Image (tube, rainbow, N blue to C red):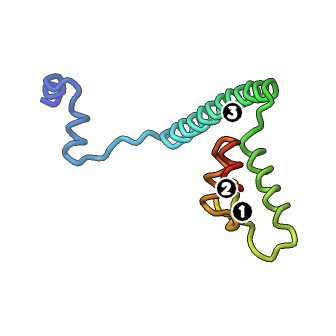
């Protein structure tokens, strides 16, 4: 009878036992296989990182060639030079350095001596300027 049952189910009795709560067959080499799989994954990841590091090094060499050809400075170098200039300006100062302010933004003392009339006269043609100055 058991033979007929196995033939009818076609080898599915092993799966039936598992479904009904039977013990699974454990592979004695499962731990070894898992360790080998993890090692393979680590190795692939290292190869991938090495590949991208090599590509980035090639790109940086090309970028540097272009910078040298056209006299362009790296962003880090420009920032370092700007920082050095700010520190040079503030040497001996007890306060923090001021941020760079474009010229004409209020740092220059305004000329209060000159009235509006004098300003208008400056923009008049020569003969008219002479008339107003007399």
For residue 51, the mark is none
Q: Distance of mark 1 from mark 3, alpha carbons?
A: 52 Å
Kindly indicate the quadrant of the structure image that contains residue 32: top right
Residue depicted at x 40% and y 42%: 26
Task: Decide which of tag 1 and tag 3 comes sooner along the chain.
Answer: 3
Per the image, label 3 sits on a secondary structure element best described as helix
Identify the image quadrant of the N terminus.
top left
Residue depicted at x 77% and y 52%: 82
| Number of the front mark, 3 or 2 | 2
Give coordinates of residue 99: x percent, y percent.
Answer: 69, 61
Identify the image quadrant of the C terminus.
bottom right
Q: Are marks 1 and 2 in contact (CB under 8 Å)?
A: yes
Q: Residues within 10 Å of mark 2 (few under 14, many from 20)?
A: few
Kindly indicate the quadrant of the structure image that contains residue 85: bottom right
Determine whether, in the image, residue 62 is placed left or right of residue 28: right
Viewer-proximal residue among 8 and 39:
39
Q: Residues within 10 Å of mark 3 (few under 14, many from 20)?
A: few
Residue at mark 1: 108
Residue at mark 2: 104
Residue at mark 3: 53
């Amino acid at each position: 009878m058991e033979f007929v049952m196995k033939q009818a189910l076609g080898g599915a009795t092993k799966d039936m036992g598992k479904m009904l709560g039977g013990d699974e067959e454990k592979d004695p080499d499962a731990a070894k296989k898992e360790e080998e799989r993890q090692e393979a994954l680590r190795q692939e990841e290292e190869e991938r990182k090495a590949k991208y590091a090599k590509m980035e090094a090639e790109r940086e060499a090309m970028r540097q060639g272009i910078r040298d050809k056209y006299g362009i400075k790296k962003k880090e170098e420009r920032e370092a030079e700007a920082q050095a200039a700010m520190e040079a300006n503030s040497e001996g100062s007890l306060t923090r350095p001021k941020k760079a302010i474009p010229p004409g933004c209020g740092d220059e003392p305004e000329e209060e001596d000159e009235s509006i009339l004098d300003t208008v006269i400056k923009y008049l043609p020569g003969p008219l300027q002479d008339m107003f100055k007399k």
